[in-house]
Amino acid sequence: VQLQASGGGLVQPGGSLRLSCGVSGSKFSINVMGWYRAAPGKQRELVASVTSGGSTNYADSVKGRFTISRDNAKNTVYLQMNSLKPEDTAVYYCNAVSETSPPLFYWGQGTLVTVSS
C-alpha cells in the first residue's frame, strides 16, 4: 500500500496551502483518512481526520482554519489550510486506516510545511 502526499511548501503567515494524499494498492476499503503533523522537537499529533461517511474531527488548534475532505472514489484525502501560523510549521503525514478487524494503519512519507515571513 502506498500513500503519496503532496502540496507542502513555504508560505507566509496568514497564507494558505492545500495538501493532498492518495492511497493506492490497498486490498481493503479505507475507513478513516487523516493528517498528522510533527513539529521540530515535538511528538506527532493528529491534525484532522475524516471517515468514509464524512464525519470529521479536528485538533482544537486548527478548528476554523483547516478543512479536511476526501474523495472516496479516488481514495484521496485533502487538507485545506488557511490563516496559517508559524506554529503550524511541521512535517505533515497522511494516514489511512482499513475497514478490517483488526484495522491496518498506513502512513505516507510526510510533506514539509513551513510558515515563515
Image (tube, grey):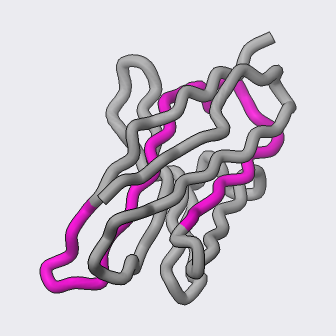
Task: Give me the residue at 71% from left, 60% from top.
Answer: 67
User: Farthest residue in the right direction?
Assistant: 14
Q: Position of residue 113 (x, y in %)?
A: 61, 28
Above or below for 30 versus 40:
below
Residue at the front extreme of this rendering: 25
Residue at 39%, 46% in the rendered image: 108
Is residue 39 left or right of 112 when viewed as pictured?
left
Q: Residue at x 50, y 38 (%)?
A: 92
- Which region is colored magenta? 76-105
Q: Residue furthest bottom?
A: 53
Left or right? Give the position of 87 relative to 105.
Answer: right
Q: Is residue 3 above or below residue 93?
A: below
Vertically, is 109 above or below 25? above
Residue 46 on image: x %, y %: 44, 51
Q: Is residue 99 magenta?
A: yes
6 or 64, nearer to the observer: 6
Return the residue nearer the eye: 103 or 47. 103
| Magenta span contains residue 100 | yes
Q: Nearer the viewer, residue 52 or 81?
A: 52
The answer to which of 63 and 44 lies nearer the viewer is 44
Q: Position of residue 88 (x, y in %)?
A: 62, 32
Residue 110 image offset from top left, x and y in percent: 44, 36
